[in-house]
Image: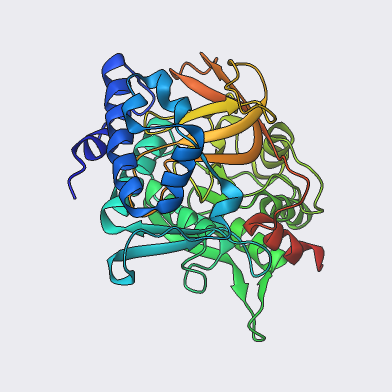
């Protein structure tokens, strides 16, 4: 299976710098991927026939909107895996123990591409450091939940700086149930924070709980310069209330002394894979490995920048599943020319759509705090 354009696209550096040549390469990579998916997946051919689409219609980057997207809900009820079990390098799930799950399959080449693209995005977003730090992962212990999407993502963040220690904070107790001991971890943060910079990654709700505990036991605690937060996985506080990035940054700065410019976030979907990293202005930038179209919820027509609609996420890196064009239930607004100076388009706002509440990793994790 030769995927020259896919490989070339995913190996590009400067992920937020786009050109006409890069647009053309993206289009060629999409055509490579779609041709493969149409050989493997009858449902993709059914969608094409239903919408009167053929790969020959992809002549310019604007033609991406003609690809019939696969609805994200469909991926929760069918695996759409293209390879045999022995050829799959990793399977990730997107939710907790109940509700609908998405299974994301990766062959070794696709996984390598994803890992490389993600690291390129993290580096150019200013998330990396050469200073050894103590890492606190507000997420499920990867030794217990190695196939959970958020655990895999959090594990990636460990490579953003040299590790003096790694602390997974949602652990299994003697009953085999996950729990988060906020008092224990608050003391540990204060202890290790006196030694070196600290870096947090994971669910914001758990960081909020930690911040309040630290304020109780060590008022005025200030993390060392170079400390950093990469949040992600559900924007609620420790009581389950909606939380804005601005309020979260203010809380962390007040109780931990980490400046708002060092508090970042990622938006991502298991069904898409490519991470959208927030900048110093709090916007999520779209790298060259991905495109996002905003569609009207009723007509599915593509809307211009600045208007809110359903997210249609497009990327060619994964050959193991036909997720090159996925229609999400999330509502978003895409804009261009962010005040932070990073080139290209960015996601200016995101909010959950749909009539039901999908129980993902963040909701499952939130229930641990609700038990307290």
The image quadrant of residue 298 is: top right
Instruction: Tell me if residue 16 comes above or below residue 257 in the rendering.
Output: above
Q: Is residue 245 visible?
A: yes
Q: Is residue 275 visible?
A: no
The residue lying at 56 percent from left, 58 percent from top is 94
The image quadrant of residue 18 is: top left
Residue 37 in the figure: left or right of residue 232: left
Could you say which is closer to the camera, residue 174 or residue 233?
Answer: 233
Instruction: Tell me if residue 146 comes above or below residue 20 in the rendering.
Output: below
Looking at the picture, the colour scheme in use is rainbow
Residue 345 in the figure: left or right of residue 235: left
Q: Position of residue 291 (x, y in %)?
A: 45, 29
Could you say which is closer to the camera, residue 189 or residue 296?
Answer: 296
Q: Position of residue 150 (x, y in %)?
A: 53, 56
The residue lying at 62 percent from left, 56 percent from top is 190
Could you say which is closer to the camera, residue 247 or residue 357?
Answer: 357
The residue lying at 53 percent from left, 27 percent from top is 293
Instruction: Tell me if residue 248 comes above or below residue 13 in the rendering.
Output: below
Residue 357 in the figure: left or right of residue 161: right
The residue lying at 55 percent from left, 50 percent from top is 200
Q: Position of residue 205 (x, y in %)?
A: 71, 52
Across the whole image, how many numbered discs are drawn on residues? 0
Considering the image in quadrants, where does the C terminus appear?
Answer: bottom right
Q: Position of residue 267 (x, y in %)?
A: 56, 40
């Amino acid at each position: 299976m030769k995927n020259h354009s896919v490989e070339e696209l995913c190996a590009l550096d400067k992920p937020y710098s786009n050109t006409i040549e890069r647009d053309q390469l993206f289009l060629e990579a999409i055509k490579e991927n779609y041709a493969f998916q149409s050989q493997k997946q009858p449902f993709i051919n059914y969608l094409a026939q239903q919408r009167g689409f053929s790969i020959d219609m992809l002549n310019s980057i604007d033609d991406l909107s003609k690809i019939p997207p696969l609805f994200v809900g469909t991926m929760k009820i069918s695996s759409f895996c293209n390879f045999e079990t022995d050829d799959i390098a990793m399977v990730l799930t997107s939710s907790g123990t109940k509700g609908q799950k998405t299974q994301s399959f990766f062959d070794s080449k696709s996984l390598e591409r994803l890992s490389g693209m993600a690291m390129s995005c993290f580096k150019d977003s200013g998330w990396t450091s050469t200073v050894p730090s103590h890492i606190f992962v507000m997420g499920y212990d990867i030794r217990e939940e190695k196939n959970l999407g958020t655990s895999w993502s959090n594990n990636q963040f460990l490579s953003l700086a040299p590790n003096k220690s790694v602390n997974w904070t949602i652990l299994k107790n003697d009953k085999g149930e996950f729990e988060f001991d906020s008092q224990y971890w608050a003391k540990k943060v204060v202890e290790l924070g006196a030694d070196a910079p600290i870096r947090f990654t994971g669910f914001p709700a758990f960081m909020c709980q930690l911040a309040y505990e630290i304020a109780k036991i060590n008022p005025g605690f200030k993390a060392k310069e170079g400390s950093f937060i990469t949040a992600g996985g559900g924007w609620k506080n420790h009581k389950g209330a909606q939380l804005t990035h601005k309020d979260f940054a203010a809380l962390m700065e007040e109780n931990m002394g980490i400046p708002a410019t060092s508090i970042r976030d990622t938006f991502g979907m298991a069904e898409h894979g490519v991470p959208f990293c927030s900048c110093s202005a709090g916007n999520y930038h779209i790298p060259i490995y991905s495109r996002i179209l905003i569609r009207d919820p009723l007509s599915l027509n593509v809307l211009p920048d600045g208007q809110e609609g359903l997210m249609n996420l497009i990327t060619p890196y994964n050959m193991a599943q036909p997720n090159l064009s996925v229609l999400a239930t999330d509502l978003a607004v895409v804009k261009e020319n962010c005040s932070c100076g990073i080139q290209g388009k960015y996601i200016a706002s995101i909010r959950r759509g749909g009539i039901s509440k999908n129980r993902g990793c963040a909701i499952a994790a939130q229930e641990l705090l609700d038990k307290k």
